[in-house]
Amino acid sequence: MTYEDAPALAASVQQPDGVPERLHQQIDFILEVDRLKTIVRRSPLLSADRRENDAEHSWHLALMTLVLAEYADEPVDVSKTLALVLVHDLVEIYAGDTFLYDTTGAADQEEREQRAARRLFAMLPADQHSRFRALWDEFEARKTPEARFAKAMDRLQPLLLNFANKGGTWRTPGVTDADVRARKSVIGDASAPLWEYAQKVIDMGAANGWVARQKHAE
């Protein structure tokens, strides 16, 4: 489910009289991003027989950042990194979640997400519009230590869920251990120790038959 053509949720909510315009805009944005809780991802939860949603994913990344920041190859501003992981998936309210191994969906992913970013962040007051959009752009560009570590968390979290579930989305037809390794390699751009761990997880998954091994030409 996505809400690309849906009216803003705030249109159905009557605000009290006399609310300052800035606060009105901020509340409208807060109400709108409640929709993130309904955007379902492919990753299976470990604690329940269902898939996680984007809000749960973002919360998990924020907690992982607090726990794992010491493994960043470069010092990171944890507060900045938290802001990046909390903002990065908001555009999926309108653009939808693009499955990591979906090459067809990836073809127009950037276009969909850019369009969604323009609509969503424009709901905020001008200064916050600029700040939130800048955070989203920073995450996408991965040119700062914080953005690289935020992206590493984004790729490590579903890896952990799939591993703990003995396969999860790794069992998608056509996906191999080499595909997983290639898609997760950005972890190594931010943290050598976490990338070493991730590769051990992938190797163990392949050894246990939880992900298909890539066949090599003889």
Image (cartoon, rainbow, N blue to C red):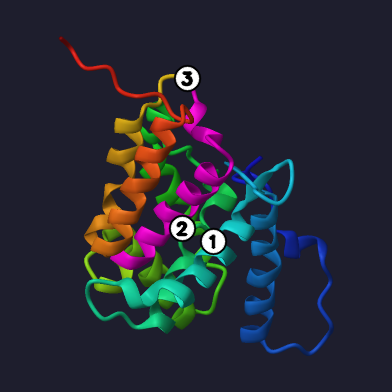
- Residue tagged by mark 3? 173
Give the image quarter of residue 212.
top left
What residue is shown with label 2? Answer: 117
The residue shown at (21%, 17%) is: 216
Query: Where is residue 174 shown, x and y percent of the image?
Result: 41, 20
Q: Which mark is residue 120?
A: 1
The secondary element bearing badge 2 is classed as helix
- For label 2, the crowd category at 10 Å Cα-Cα, with few meaning under 14, some 14 to 19 and many 20 or more, is many
Looking at the image, is mark 3 or mark 2 nearer the viewer?
3
Identify the residue at the far top of this view.
Answer: 218
Dominant secondary-structure state across the stretch colored magenta: helix
Relative to the observer, which residue lies in front, 164 or 129?
Answer: 164
Query: SS class of the residue under badge 3?
Result: loop
Most foreground residue, 78 or 180: 180
Whether residues under marks 2 and 1 lie with C-beta atoms below 8 angstroms apart, the answer is: yes
* Residue segment shown in magenta: 148-172
Query: Where residue 145 appears, x then y in whole percent?
Result: 25, 72
